[in-house]
Image (cartoon, grey):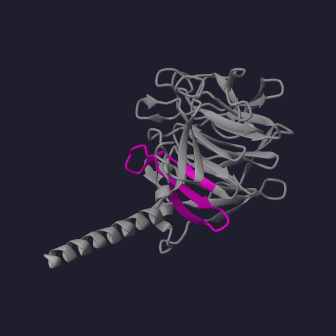
Amino acid sequence: MKQIKLAAMLFVLSGLVMLNACSSDDDDDDTLGNWTKVTPFKGVKRSGAFSFTIGTKVFVGLGYDGDDYWSDVYGFDINNGYWESMAPFPGKARERAVAFSVNGKGYVGLGYNRDEDTEELRDFWEYDPATNAWDSLGLFGGSARYNAIAFAIGSKGYVGTGYDGDNTNSDFWQYDPSTNTWSEIVSYPGDKIESGLAFVVDGKAYIGTGRDNGLFNLDFWEFVPGTDGSNPTWTKRTPDDDESDYDEFKLAMYRYDATAVTVGTKVYIIGGVASTGAAVKTVYVFDATTFDWDDRTGYEGSARSLAVGYVLSDRIFVGTGQNGTSRYDDIWEFKPLEEYDETY
């Protein structure tokens, strides 16, 4: 009888040790990153909208809801906490345009509208939040296109890559708002891409993801403008396949129509369409100081592509977008340094 009791006690103790060990392992394996649903976008559900930020405010507009193209524009100030209607975009309604901001003004152009005689668009526009007004800037320096990438460094804007209806492109252009002029600069040296990503950290841009004729690639390049903004230096930053974080890098790059946001020296790549052909929720982080890659908690809304992502006061927000024929108007805040909590 004593032997049976002793065996039972040993079994219980063994189970407690195993339970504690499992709990410890689970804690060690927790992926950082927590998502919270916030105030939804004011306009109709859509994908392929533009966004740019000026100060504490983001501006979001255009896009496609599956039936119609939209020209409406909305602003959200992080200090006020609500969306308000802004002056509508005066050009043709469209999706998949590019946008950036320089010196307190926003710039929007290019894009796609299948209902127009010329589906690929080439016009460019300037938005002044001080007057809530748009001005036409004429035509982009390169060919009409959509699924291009754009970013701003210093007082200049940059636009390149994309699809013009016949070809995927690698050309790159610099825009000077002070003279309203476009100058062609050194082309993107990687494989031609559309639906790629560009993000800026400490005056350097990084370009990756995307596809060409349905093929994915692992190109990842750093762009450093010259002293006058032109004649950039391109440096390949694709890690070696024997590096410990190569798998994370590969999973981060093998996607298109994803979203990227930057806080400090960290860049978060969110969602998009993976090489499987399905929209994903996965999130990967790139550290521009160490060139390390890691994963984070996946997006808690529906998996999606062609969403907008923006940062206001170092807070990250992602929303709108599509998955198949479904479009969305929900917005989620991402807290990359918090542990995941499924109740929030």
What residue is at 41 percent from the left and 30 percent from the top?
Answer: 325
Q: Start and end of the magenta stretch?
A: 267-296
Q: Eyeballing the image, is 330 above or below 170? A: above
Q: In the figure, residue 287 lies in which quadrant? A: bottom right
Residue reaching furthest left? Answer: 1
Magenta stretch: includes residue 134: no
Residue reaching furthest right? Answer: 178
Q: How many marks?
A: 0
Residue reaching furthest bottom? Answer: 3
- Asked if one can make out residue 114 in the rendered structure from this viewpoint, the answer is yes
Across and down, in percent, residue 271 comes to: 49, 46
Q: Eyeballing the image, is 278 above or below 59? A: below
Direction from residue 229 to residue 93 in the image, left or right? left
Across and down, in percent, residue 63 comes to: 57, 28
- Looking at the figure, which quarter contains the N terminus? bottom left
Across and down, in percent, residue 321 comes to: 51, 35
Direction from residue 35 to residue 127 in the image, left or right? right
Residue reaching furthest front? Answer: 2
**As rendered, which of 4 and 68 lies closer to the eye?**
4
What residue is at 78 percent from the left and 54 percent from the top?
Answer: 230
Across and down, in percent, residue 162 comes to: 58, 43
**As rendered, which of 216 and 203 lies closer to the eye?**
203
Q: In the figure, residue 4 lies in which quadrant? A: bottom left
What residue is at 49 percent from the left and 52 percent from the top?
Answer: 297
Magenta stretch: includes residue 276: yes
**As rendered, which of 298 and 21 lies closer to the eye?**
21
- Asked if one can make out residue 89 in the rendered structure from this viewpoint, the answer is no
